[in-house]
Image (spheres, rainbow, N blue to C red):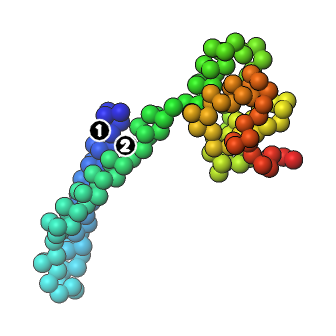
């Protein structure tokens, strides 16, 4: 995780430094082009306060972009957890666990569909898997508090 954050910080700082270099180069070109056409053009310069602000923005963006993927990687993988749980309970022959893309209702978070029962669970969290396994997959009783009231494609 620290490598990911460090990599994004370095990339952000390199991008910020490239921006400052481009600004300095552009400033020189504008001063040369402006000549006598713009009054007091020789006084135009990069402001140290603006450069410090740019440095702060670069660090913030680098830290944010480094932490977001790391946070995503740290989240538990529900598919692997459900596969392990069904295997440990001896349900491997009767339960197939697959990762899919969005199952129509993407805004409802992680969705679990139990077929042929046609029961759909929405916003499934890691702590819900135990209840889904014991109540529905083993005992045949759907977990009502997690079930979607409107089943997709019906």
Q: Which is nearer the N-term, disc 1 or disc 2?
A: 1
Q: If the image is split into quadrants, where does the N terminus sit?
A: top left
Residue 133 appears left or right of 75: right
Q: Quadrant of residue 89?
A: top right
Left or right, residue 109 beside residue 40: right
Residue 88 visible in image: yes
Assign a secondary structure to mark 2.
Answer: helix
**Residue 37 placement: quadrant:** bottom left
Q: CA distance from mark 1 to mark 2?
A: 7 Å
Q: Position of residue 43 (x, y in %)?
A: 12, 78
Q: Residues within 10 Å of mark 2 (few under 14, many from 20)?
A: many
Q: Which sits in the foreground, 70 or 120? A: 120
Query: Hey, which residue is sitting farthest right in the picture?
Result: 154
- Residue 108, compared with residue 5, is above or below; it is below
Along the viewing direction, whichever of 100 and 145 lies nearer the viewer: 145
Which residue position is annotated with label 1? 6
The image shows residue 125 at horizontal and vertical percentages of: 58, 37
Q: Where's residue 22, x and y in %? A: 27, 60
From the viewer's perspective, is 26 left or right of 102?
left
The answer to whether residue 120 is left or right of residue 20 is: right
Q: Is residue 49 above or below residue 20?
A: below
Q: Which mark is residue 66?
A: 2
Give the camera-side residue of 116 and 128.
Answer: 128
Q: Outermost residue toward the left?
A: 43
Residue 131's place in the image compared with 110, above or below, is above
- Residue shown at 80%/46% (left/top)? 151
- Tell me which residue sits at (19%, 61%) in the image: 52
Q: Are marks 1 and 2 in contact (CB under 8 Å)?
A: yes
Query: Residue drawn 72% across and 16% down?
Result: 91
């Amino acid at each position: 995780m620290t490598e990911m954050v460090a990599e994004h910080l370095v990339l952000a700082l390199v991008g910020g430094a490239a921006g400052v270099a481009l600004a300095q180069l552009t400033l020189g070109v504008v001063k040369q082009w402006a000549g006598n056409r713009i009054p007091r053009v020789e006084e135009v310069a990069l402001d140290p306060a603006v450069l410090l602000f740019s440095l702060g923005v670069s660090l913030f963006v680098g830290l944010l972009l480094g932490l977001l993927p790391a946070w995503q990687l740290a989240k538990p993988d529900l598919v692997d957890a459900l596969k392990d749980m069904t295997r440990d309970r001896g349900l491997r022959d009767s339960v197939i666990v697959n990762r899919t893309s969005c199952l129509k209702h993407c805004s409802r978070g992680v969705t679990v569909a139990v077929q042929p029962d046609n029961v759909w669970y929405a916003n499934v969290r890691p702590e819900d898997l135990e209840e889904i396994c014991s109540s529905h997959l083993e005992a045949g009783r759907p977990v009502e508090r997690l079930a979607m009231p409107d089943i997709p494609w019906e």
